[in-house]
Amino acid sequence: MSVNMPPSHPFDFDAVATGGNDDKLHEECGIYGVIGVSDAANFVALGLHALQHRGREAGGIVSHHPEKGFNSARRFGYVRDNFTRASLMETLPGPLAIGHVRYSTAGAKGPTQIRDVQPFFGEFSMGGAAIAHNGNITNADALRRELIERGSIFQSGSDSECIIHLMARSLQRSIPDRMEDALRRVEGAFSVVAMTRDELIGVRDPLGVRPLVLGQIADGWVLSSETCALDIIGARFIREVAPGEMVVITSQGVESHFPFRPARPRFCIFEHVYFSRPDSILGGRSVYETRRQIGVELAREAPVEADLVCPVPDSGTPAAIGYAHESGIPFSMGIIRNQYVGRTFIEPTEQIRNMGVRLKLNVNRALVKDKRVILVDDSVVRGTTSRKIREMILDAGAAEVHFRIASPPTQWPCFYGVDTPQREKLIVATMSEEEICAYMGADSLRFISLDGLYRAVGEAGGRDPSCPQYCDACFSGDYPVAPSDQIENGFRLKAAGKAAE
Ligand code: SF4
């Protein structure tokens, strides 16, 4: 086992420049696995690099070699700063490897500890196994209490470690069977990539909340959170792992099982809006095209007279293109993003900290002066960044600023693997749309409706309120899996029968 030390207060310009980590929702993990190629860990490192947007605090890789056994490395920081060094990659030999990138997980808020960095490893009577989990176990507190009472000794603060301990308690004779046993006890959202000495295993929860795809490279196979991470190694996209499916991949090929009670899928609709990379394919749809279509819907729902449509870069760009196309108002890069701002780990002076969003975004003055500007952003969580951006645009001489937001108001926390502030800190949970508009100092503010978002992801009839086609709990408060730990801690669900807003 090879570990590095926590960075001594790495300064994250991206976080400061977006008003702190709380002003955007963050996907908490990306997972990846490869079997059947020599030096699989190198492929995993490339895949994790392509998934870095899903978690950039830390990453880890476990590999297996027939003679050298299991090896692992876990590191703080970006994949490219760690898993590109030959001296490290040589310690991860073999044709089978899995990996994980993480933001801070629900089980371990606060500073990341190296013991929380996945994959987790367990030694069982039939051999070792490593697992990497994307999602969040909503009954993890209850499971942890039960497991500790029965003698389990936890190594980390992560909810995902419960899976290893549940596997250890199972009486099944194979690791895939033990995983099935363990995951049947788990509630919430999980996409899991796991490995034994000679198997690569992928599982999605029955609702398929988090993504997982299967690819092929020469005689080998790949599991990945997103298709963009297949492209980087030249793997061919085969299909999505289905909700509730377990695939067990060996040198003989792919075996598929459906160990859970069938349920109607509720994929995370926010993956389409924000989390996934625009060059990925989700549910057979291009993420870029869906985001462009969100802009089209937004222009139909919330037109306004203006001179320019500008994206808040980068994630607002496809929706701004769609809005401009539908409205006929010219698209313009009125705000330019400094691509390198998040890459410097230095301790800044207070004066530099106070520059905030200006470190990351700059207004293209020549374009916006005297113009009525429509700013298209992907989401508003606390509103602090939007407020600063509006100030910068007006300072640059714009005549009016109209916000158009490519997601419905984020009113509820996510308990399925996305880092959201407490409900009281979500601006739309505490203010009306008019109040937010006034707080942001904008000339107008409109969010896309939930039905408009559903139409953009291909549901022509909009959201089916009796049986929603996606998880949209952070917008609607309609949680497809009751967050039992949270309820026990006092979280109050929306009153039954109240329509999604
Ligand atoms: S609550 Fe929101 S972010 Fe979380 S899984 Fe559901 S749609 Fe996605």
Image (tube, rainbow, N blue to C red):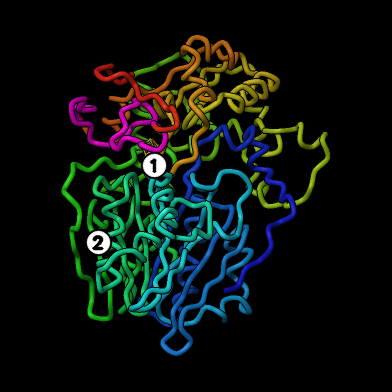
Q: x, y (%) of residue 228?
A: 41, 57
Pointer 2 residue: 246
Q: Position of residue 7 (x, y in %)?
A: 70, 56
Q: Main secondary structure of the magenta part?
A: loop
Residue at point 52% right, 17% down?
Answer: 402
Secondary element type, mark 1: loop
Above or below, 431 against 345 in this view is above
Residue 467 in magenta stretch? yes
Q: Regarding ligand 1, which quadrant of the image does it lie in?
A: top left
Mark 1 lies within 8 Å of ligand 1 (Cβ measured): yes
In the image, 317: left or right of 170?
A: right
Residue reaching furthest to the bottom: 67
- Residue bounds of the magenta highlight: 460-487
User: From what the image shows, is residue 392 above or below residue 340?
Assistant: above
> From the viewer's perspective, is 238 left or right of 474?
left
Tell me which residue sits at (45%, 25%) in the image: 405
At x 43%, y 48%, the residue is: 145
Picture quadrant of residue 76 = bottom right
Residue topped by disc 1: 416
Residue 114 can be seen in this image: yes
Residue 468 lies in magenta, yes or no? Answer: yes
